[in-house]
Every structure is written in C-alpha cells, then in structure tokens.
Amino acid sequence: MELTPDVEWILGRPNFWCAPIAHRLVKLGLATIKPHAEEEQAYVLHWLLSLHEKHGATFRAEADKILNTKHPFTGDGGEPCKKCGRLQAALIHDFAGDGDCVK
Ligand SMILES: [Zn+2]
C-alpha cells in the first residue's frame, strides 16, 4: 500500500477522533466493537482504509453516507453537534473529541 495523502490522513486519525464514529457504527448495528479506545481506533482505521480501497478519493463521502443513515428500526439519526447541528460522527464534521466543533 502506497502512503498517499489520503492513506496518511486515515492512519493519522487519533483515538478520540475515532470514538464517535465507532459508537455510531455500533449503534447502527454495523459493527461489534469493544468499548476500548484502541479497539475503536483499529476498527475505524481499518473501516476507512477499506472504503478508500473500494472507492478511492470519494471514501469520505461514502463513509458519511453510511454514518448519516438513520437506524432502520429506531429512526435514530445520531448525535448532533451542539454548536453546528451536524452529525458528530461524520467525517465532514471533523469532530475534535473535546466537544468543540472545529469547522
Ligand atoms: Zn459542529
């Protein structure tokens, strides 16, 4: 695997950035991840690398399409940011992990 800017970006995601995405995938029933920072980070990095391998440059949009899916039974759409209203667990939001919206 070549270390392109996208691959470098994925592999550089810190664990606190990965946590809300891992929680969202578990809540949607798409993943089983133990609630440990290391396992959440490993799962999310692998998930993003797989999306990148499949979709190339559009992997962020593909990830957000999945994360923004409403739960099929509960209709749960995820936790919105208190500042901007966007889904916290979305790549477009770039959640900083400390409750602050960075965009
Ligand atoms: Zn925000």
Image: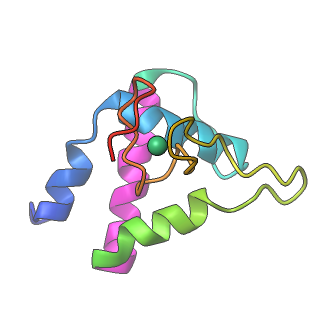
Tell whether 68 sits left or right of 17. Answer: right
User: Does 96 appear above or below 35?
Assistant: below
Q: Which residues are magenta?
A: 38-56
| x and y percentages locating residue 42 in the rendered image | 38, 38
Magenta: predominant secondary structure element? helix
Tell whether 21 sits left or right of 95. Answer: right
Residue 3 falls in image quadrant? bottom left
Q: How many marks?
A: 0
The quarter of the picture where the N terminus appears is bottom left
Residue 68 falls in image quadrant? bottom right
| x and y percentages locating residue 103 in the rendered image | 33, 47
Question: Which residue sits at x=49%, y=21%?
Answer: 36
Question: Which residue sits at x=28%, y=33%?
Answer: 14
Question: Which residue sits at x=88%, y=49%?
Answer: 74
| x and y percentages locating residue 84 in the rendered image | 51, 46
Given residues 55 and 77, the one toward you in this image is: 77
Judge whether residue 62 is colored magenta. no
Question: Which residue sits at x=35%, y=29%?
Answer: 15
Residue 4 falls in image quadrant? bottom left
Q: Farthest residue toward the right?
A: 73
Tell whether 97 sits left or right of 14. Answer: right
Q: How is the image coloured?
A: rainbow
Given residues 84 and 68, the one toward you in this image is: 84
Judge whether residue 46 is colored magenta. yes
| x and y percentages locating residue 102 in the rendered image | 32, 40
User: Does 2 appear above or below 74?
Assistant: below
